[in-house]
Amino acid sequence: MTAQHATYERIRQVLEESEKPLTAREILDSLEDAEVESSHEIATVLGRRAQYGEVDVIRDRPYRYQV
């Protein structure tokens, strides 16, 4: 498993456990490891996955994400 895939899997877990869409900052606050350093990194990972339909992006201010 690549580091990017592992990061996505941790982010996806947080989204699956949430009852509502989350912002990148809320996801970062829910992660307990130091490998993800910024909400920008989370937004980048989720934006790439959204291109393939794996993540829904709610284009609001701020963006929210759900699986």
Image (cartoon, helix red, strand yellow):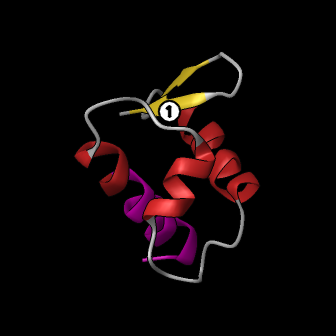
Is any atom of residue 22 visible in this view?
Answer: yes
* Position in image of residue 64 (x %, y %): 55, 29
**Camera-side residue: 14 or 9?**
14
* Position in image of residue 65 (x %, y %): 50, 32
User: In this figure, which residue is indicated by the disc labeled 1?
Assistant: 65
Quarter in which the C terminus is drawn: top left
**Camera-side residue: 6 or 57?**
57
- Judge left or right: residue 17 versus residue 47: left
* Position in image of residue 53 (x %, y %): 46, 26
The part of the image, by quadrant, that contains residue 21 is top left
Q: Residue at x 39, y 64 (%)?
A: 10
The part of the image, by quadrant, that contains residue 6 is bottom left
The part of the image, by quadrant, that contains residue 66 is top left
Figure check: 10 above or below 16: below
Q: Which residues are magenta?
A: 1-12
Q: Does dot 1 land on a helix, a strand or a loop?
A: strand
Quarter in which the N terminus is drawn: bottom left
**Camera-side residue: 9 or 36?**
36
Magenta highlight: main SS:
helix
Does 5 lie within the magenta span?
Answer: yes
* Position in image of residue 34 (x %, y %): 58, 83
Q: Residue at x 51, y 76 (%)?
A: 2
- Judge left or right: residue 47 versus residue 64: right
Figure check: 31 above or below 15: below
Q: Residue at x 69, y 55 (%)?
A: 39
